Image (cartoon, rainbow, N blue to C red):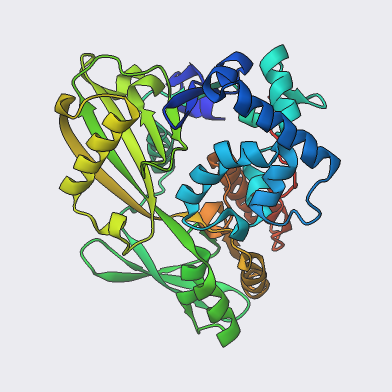
Amino acid sequence: LWREILDGDLLVRKRMSRIYYRGHFFDYPLRPLNALRGLGLVEAIRVGASYLRVQLAPIPDESTFDAWVSNRFGRRLFEIFFETYTEKVWGMPCSEISAAWAAQRIKNLDLRTALKNAILGNGTRGGEVVTSLIEEFHYPRLGPGMMWERCRDLAASHGVETHTTSRVVRVHHDGQRVSAIDVAGPDGTRRREPCGALISSMPIGELVSAMHPAPPGEVREAASSLRYRDFLIVGLIVGREHLFPDNWIYIHSPEVRVGRVQSFKNWSPDMVSDPALSFVGLEYFANRGDDLWSMTDDDLVELGKSEAEAIGLFEPHEVQAGTVVRMPRAYPVYDGEYEAHLGVLRGWLGRLGNLHTVGRNGQHRYNNQDHSMLTAMAAVENINNGVTGKDNIWEVNTESEYHEEK
């Protein structure tokens, strides 16, 4: 579908990722000799012994992230390669994170499969490709935003207008169907739009809060109890043609706050207009109102420069300019209570036959972009076929060991 829509603007890219941990860079996917050099022989033996120990006596209750990962990689490898990064992302101990997130995002991977891929290079498990190990994919020439700009243009060619910088502030319903929405434009003026059907990707808790008449108290309480993790990226223009070969570097070291570094030029050279320069993004995870989120842009740029130097990527004096982009509610939090709260919301919203919630925030589910698009496509199919059920939308990416076929 995207090859057709983007009409030649897709590049075939090799996945290039590494992990940085306490002064060492580790290839990802795993390369045994590289890992052995980084860990050292003694630590490698400890990792192997830890894995064997958990194979003989697995943790009985693996409902939390730390137990789920430890059962598949051993406790020591969990502490080195999973714990610090995961706690940076979520801002909470791994023992408080639901295993549902691991089952979705680590994707059929365990230590045995990772080693098999490293040695044989097939990246398969039972004949299926393990997505965490896929090393080649398509990428839009000017970044993923091209997809949505092209969708906007295609919609316009069919007479459908896209309104951006607008906000849905109220959703009118009669308990069985949505009838209209109130929209606030960028100038603050409001208008009412009638609805034959409504597809919503706004945070599901905010959708419930916008409902008129308001839902019962227990539904509103469940909506307000869902938690999110916010995200900001510090973009730095660096006066060097080439910095490192990776698309992403995952920063597992606790000594710095940055969680991931990406080079946009390595995704596509057309994303940097001057070939003599590089543009990198240092990604930070925060909660709105905390010290990191509240820092000024100038202070965040200085933090990014100093942490890039600490990791060994480039010197602060090489940075020519910087910018900061903040994205609230980037990650729906999988804490121990979220499934119960989400169940309450699904039960009440499911009564509205022409309302379809889709996407990461619309379902409070940490889906990747592919699966988020599939939920929207399922919603459109339901509308076209006059189907009021929503099960097919919610069944996208629900298998406990999720995979994609190559």
Residue 246 or residue 330, whichever sits in front: 246
Quadrant assignment for the N terminus: top right
Q: Nearer the viewer, residue 58 or 85?
A: 58
Residue at 38% in and 60% down: 287
Residue 27 x %, y %: 53, 21
Residue displayed at 53% across by 68% down: 226
**For the C terminus, which image quadrant?**
top right
Give the quadrant of residue 33.
top right
Left or right for 262, reference 61 = left
Point out residue 328 in the picture as x, y percentages from the top left corner: 37, 56
Displayed quadrant of residue 31: top right
Q: Does residue 49 appear in this view?
A: yes
Residue furthest toward the right?
A: 56
**Relative to residue 235, is residue 132 drawn left or right?**
right
Query: Does any portion of residue 397 appear in the rendered image?
Result: no
> Residue visible at 56% across and 25% down?
39
Of residues 194 and 249, the one drawn nearer to the viewer in this rendering: 249
- Of residue 399 and residue 362, the one placed in the foreground of this image is 399
On screen, residue 401 versus residue 262, left or right, reads right
Residue 275 vs 157, above or below: the answer is above
Image location of residue 50, percent across then percent down = 72, 37
In the image as oriented, which residue stretches furthest toward the front?
42
Q: Residue at x 67, y 17 (%)?
A: 118
Residue 370, picture quadrant: top right
